[in-house]
Image: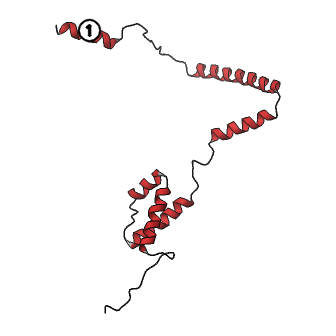
Amino acid sequence: MANRKRQICTFSGMGYRKVQRSNSIRRSKLPKIHQIWLRENDYKNVGWDNVIRLYQKINELLAQPDVDDEPTLEDLFLEADHIGQKYQTREEIESFNQQMAVEVSEISDLVDQQFPETEFELIDYSQTSRSQAKARQYRQKNR
């Protein structure tokens, strides 16, 4: 019975320890948020079925495009503005900026008409603050 050879299980041409090592290395390359998500959703690197499941999930996560690499909407608008300014003269840019300022002030006036501020905010710029005055009162009481 001791002469009987064990059948070695492999996954993608790798044995159990190689898959574990591969999982560890590739998981460390993932963003921290994905690493935490894997841990919270019980993707473990122990047990043959768990190791295979983790390997496949890491493949899925690595195949997803990074959100950080995609430009934001603000970046796209800035780039479009930069490109547009190449093909406009200084006078055209200045006239556009003046028209934009007029439009913005008209919109601001409309907003103020529809949503008036009824409460006034008072700001006290005196030298002594309330906390200092309260501290003085407390000291005088306890003497």
Residue 52 image offset from top left, x and y in percent: 45, 70
Element type where label 1 sits in the image = helix
| Residue shown at 63% from the left, 45% from the top | 71
Residue 135 vertical placement versus 10 (above, below): above
Asked whether 73 or 26 is in front, the reply is: 26
Quarter containing the N terminus: bottom left
Location of mark 1 (residue): 136
Residue 59 image offset from top left, x and y in percent: 52, 64
Q: Residue furthest left?
A: 143
Which amino acid, by three-letter code, is at mark 1? Arg
Q: Is residue 85 left or right of residue 55?
A: right
| Residue shown at 57% from the left, 61% from the top | 63
Colour scheme in the image?
secondary structure
| Residue shown at 50% from the left, 56% from the top | 29
Residue 60 image offset from top left, x and y in percent: 53, 62
Asked whether 124 or 26 is in front, the reply is: 26
Residue 77 falls in image quadrant: top right
Asked whether 100 or 5 is in front, the reply is: 5
Quarter containing the C terminus: top left
| Residue shown at 79% from the left, 34% from the top | 86
Q: Looking at the image, how many numbered discs can be counted on the residues?
A: 1
Asked whether 100 or 72 is in front, the reply is: 72
Residue 54 image offset from top left, x and y in percent: 44, 65
Residue 90 falls in image quadrant: top right
Q: How crowded is mark 1: few (under 14 residues within 10 Å), some or many (20 or more)?
A: few
Residue 15 vertical placement versus 32 (above, below): below
